[in-house]
Image: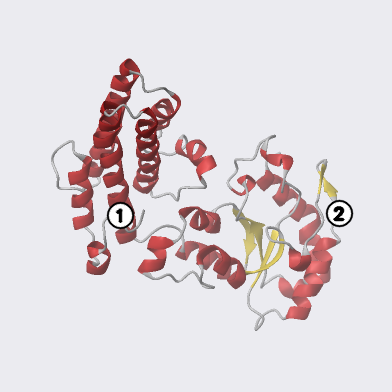
Amino acid sequence: MKGLELARQYYENYGQPMLAEQFPELLPLVAVGLCGSGSECFGWDDDVSRDHDFEPGFCLFLPGEDVVDRKTAFQLERAYAKLPKEFGGITRGLMQPVGGARRGVLRIAEWCAEKTGTPDGILTPAAWLSLPEQSLAETVNGEIFCDAYGELTALRERLHYFPEDVRRKKLAGNLLLMAQSGQYNYQRCLAHGEQAAAQLAVCEFSRAAISAIFLLNRIYQPYYKWSFRALRALPVLSFEAELLEYLLTTDNEPETAAEKYDVIEGIAADLIDCLIDEELTKANCGDLEKHAYSVNDGIADGQVRNLHILAAV
């Protein structure tokens, strides 16, 4: 059973009755679900990932103390801690103080501040540009089973994806990195006899390409160890995953290097086609650097547009 389904069933069997019987006054105020850190919150948990932080449990999100006071929150924590320790053949770990970091009772404002630096998810352009994308992904992943009060749902909707100017800034920076590392420096490193540097160029190109593909899909990129898994499931350009894996896992001997450069140019051409289809670029060439600056020129906010093109990467 996947972690999200385990959490839902555990809530329906034990959490929901506990709330109804012991805290009926909280039913209109508490949001319940599973989201945040951990592969199970993305639906990617498997036998390997379940060796840590995997247990039957769920999150109880509370509004501020002006709505739900500390005493009630503490009583709810105690009640959650007393729920059955085993469910579906899986045992819960020991509870940490104040409900634990990932499960149990969480204040919405504190949880949001941990992920975004603000208690309400209202971000300045500078914050949008600087926040780790994986943290934003963790604010909108998983499932919310119930939220009558609506505060958590509104927060997740507010953070559902980057503002368009921020997306373009990040996209422009990654396109420029792809151009520098893949279209330019890969072959130059090889010409200098620098095999290791050439592979670093491949890594940089691949990292930037993955970021650009997520941006073109308008989906937050998760933590790097899950990027390929998520990449393969994207609606646009998911087939690039196989090509990028080839770049990263092969050597740079002359015959392979020539083929790898062709793959790099092929990936670049595919992204350029998407840029043109979305009308994100006015450039008409195969040079990713020119497309990067064209994407940057299309940013509406002058302050964001005039930042260094690599400011968001």
Q: Is residue 93 above or below residue 194?
A: below
234 left or right of 188? right
Q: Residue furthest bottom?
A: 66
Q: Is residue 183 above or below residue 91?
A: above
Residue pointed to by mark 2: 84
Residue at (26% x, 56% y) in the render: 309
Residue at (73% x, 62% y) in the render: 100
- Quarter-of-image position of residue 43: top right
- Quarter-of-image position of residue 265: top left
Q: Which residue type carries mark 2?
A: Pro
Q: Residues within 10 Å of mark 2 (few under 14, many from 20)?
A: some
Horizontal and vertical percent position of residue 131: 45, 61
Task: Mark yes or no: residue 149 visible.
Answer: no
Going from N to C along the chain, the mark reached first, 2 or 1, is 2
Q: Residues within 10 Å of mark 1 (few under 14, many from 20)?
A: some
Residue pointed to by mark 1: 310
- Quarter-of-image position of residue 128: bottom left
Front disc: 2 or 1: 1
244 left or right of 279? right
SS under mark 1: loop
Horizontal and vertical percent position of residue 136: 49, 58
Please state which of residues 165 and 11 is positioned toward the viewer in this rendering. Answer: 165
Horizontal and vertical percent position of residue 169: 30, 56
Residue at (66% x, 36% y) in the render: 46
Residue at (39% x, 71% y) in the render: 124
Do tag 2 and tag 1 residues touch (Cβ < 8 Å)? no
Task: Mark yes or no: residue 45 visible.
Answer: yes
